[in-house]
């Protein structure tokens, strides 16, 4: 991407490629700035299902189901949504033509006002940013939680003020196209294999995550997981002071656990936050999320008492190890947000009773070997139900490690029905697919809502 700290969009024709939520809100922001958005998506208006209705009657021009490369001659600027890779034909042709190209996150960040917090990582992003939003609101701030979480950052940029806190969940897709993006506090929570169909190699994926620290300086704070070896490697060469978080170490500046208590060491002082057992959301991974959120909030001036009160009351996020219902002695748990192997491992580790695990979905070209070994070693995973594009690979890798309690399902509905029949009284059915949802659903939220609907429609035997 070309260096561009500011851009005058007044009167400019901006080709916006990708009309999901980010593209729609970027177009609304462009209109506010006096630009003329050229709306482009591979889908037509009918397939987009009315999500562009808010742009009808504006100066936006509609170019749906058209080749974006052919539209570049009409554009002064190319704005890409997160779903558009930087090596896609339209981006490469724009570079050849010398057309200024910008990603939605970068565009929104250039227009936003407020204290920017950027949180990325393979897992835990949504929980951490949601918790951060509640901490800052409890401290009396106006805090916006947006980005990859579902509310586009462009929407926040339209309404934010200098005194606001902008907590932003950031994906590796968004980080591909950042340029001048500068977060007052930036965090990488963890890095495990994911999205290799987009980034090709782990080295590329890691490099994308590290870009969240670009342009930070001595007045900012970089937050890293001291228990994650890739995060530890990321620390080398950073310009901002590092605040670590760790469940295992107690010797670094940042948030840690000692004698069952969460403490923060910063500016040479130690501050007690609260007992670790007071964190309401369960699991070791959620303790890590709580540590990360606590140290970010603390270094930005939130009192320890406010952090502690929020940790005690925060109930977690929808679609992440979400209890749905108990029926005939079986607990149904929705972890549709478990879209990679490491996330599903964390969900498995929270199970305390025999569990039927629903696995499978969109193929991101990653290995499930580590997940398979964790399943065969887990005392709780009594059975797996496999479905989707990755079902063959999952079955192969499970059988290679000696796990044979496997049932295949042709549809999502069949997977839920089979899981009910396989579950034991006193046990669980856990939807944690370890895969994205795009082979069957538009997003993990839709998959999770369908699971909850099916579970609530069940009648007692």
Image: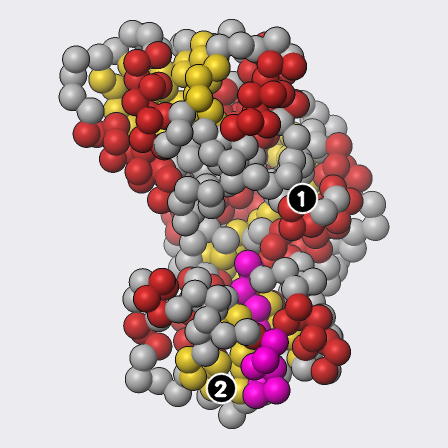
Q: Are marks 2 and 1 in contact (CB under 8 Å)?
A: no
Question: How are the colours assigned in the image?
Answer: secondary structure
Which residue is depicted at the point 20% across and 24% down?
458
Say if 21 sits above or below 344 in the image.
Answer: below
Q: Secondary structure at mark 1?
A: helix
Please state which of residues 175 and 441 is positioned toward the viewer in this rendering. Answer: 441
Compared with 128, 210 (above or below) is below
Was residue 65 drawn as part of the magenta stretch in this picture? Answer: no
Which stretch is magenta?
Answer: 69-83
- Reading the image, the residue beneath label 1 is 196
Which residue is labeled 2 in the image? 35
In the rendered view, does 424 fall on the left or right side of 282? left
Assign a secondary structure to mark 2.
Answer: loop
Q: Nearer the viewer, residue 136 or 378?
A: 378
Q: Which part of the image, by quadrant, shows the N terminus?
A: bottom right
Residue 161 can be seen in this image? no
Is label 2 or label 1 in front?
1
- Identify the residue at horizontal 41%, vertical 9% (top origin): 354
Sequence-wise, which precedes: disc 2 or disc 1? 2
């Amino acid at each position: 991407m070309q260096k561009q700290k500011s851009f005058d969009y007044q009167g400019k024709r901006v080709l916006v490629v990708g009309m999901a939520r980010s593209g729609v809100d970027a177009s609304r922001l462009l209109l506010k700035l006096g630009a003329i958005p050229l709306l482009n998506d591979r889908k037509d208006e009918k397939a987009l299902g009315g999500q562009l209705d808010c742009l009808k009657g504006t100066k936006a021009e509609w170019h749906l189901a058209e080749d974006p490369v052919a539209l570049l001659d009409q554009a002064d600027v190319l704005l890409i949504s997160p779903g558009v890779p930087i090596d896609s034909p339209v981006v490469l042709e724009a570079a050849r033509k010398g057309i200024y190209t910008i990603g939605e996150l970068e565009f929104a960040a250039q227009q936003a006002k407020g204290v920017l917090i950027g949180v990325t990582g393979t897992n835990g992003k949504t929980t951490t940013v949601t918790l951060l939003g509640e901490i800052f609101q409890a401290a009396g701030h106006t805090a916006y939680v947006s980005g990859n979480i579902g509310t586009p950052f462009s929407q926040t940029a339209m309404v934010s003020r200098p005194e606001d806190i902008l907590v932003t969940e950031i994906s590796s897709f968004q980080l591909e196209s950042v340029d001048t993006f500068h977060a007052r506090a930036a965090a990488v929570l963890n890095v495990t294999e994911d999205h290799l169909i987009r980034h090709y190699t782990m080295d590329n994926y890691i490099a994308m995550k590290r870009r969240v620290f670009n342009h930070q300086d001595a007045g900012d704070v970089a937050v890293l997981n001291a228990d994650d070896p890739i995060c530890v490697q990321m620390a080398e060469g950073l310009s901002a002071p590092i605040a670590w978080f760790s469940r295992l170490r107690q010797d670094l500046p940042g948030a840690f656990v000692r004698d069952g208590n969460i403490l923060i060491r910063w500016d040479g002082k130690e501050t007690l936050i609260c007992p670790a057992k007071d964190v309401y959301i369960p699991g070791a991974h959620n303790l890590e999320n709580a540590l990360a959120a606590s140290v970010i909030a603390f270094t930005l001036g939130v009192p320890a008492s406010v952090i502690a009160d929020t940790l005690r009351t925060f109930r977690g996020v929808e679609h992440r190890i979400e209890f749905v219902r108990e029926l005939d002695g079986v607990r149904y748990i929705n972890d549709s947000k478990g879209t990679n192997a490491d996330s599903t491992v964390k969900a498995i580790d929270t199970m305390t009773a025999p569990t039927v695990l629903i696995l499978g979905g969109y193929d991101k070209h990653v290995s499930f070997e580590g997940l398979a070994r964790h399943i065969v070693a887990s005392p709780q995973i009594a059975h797996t139900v496999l479905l989707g594009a990755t079902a063959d690979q999952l079955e192969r890798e499970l059988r290679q490690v000696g796990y044979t309690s496997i049932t295949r399902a042709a549809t999502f509905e069949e997977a839920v029905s089979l899981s009910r029949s396989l579950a034991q009284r006193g046990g669980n059915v856990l939807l944690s697919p370890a895969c994205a949802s795009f082979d069957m659903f538009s997003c993990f939220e839709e998959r999770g809502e369908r699971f909850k609907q099916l579970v609530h429609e069940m009648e007692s035997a």
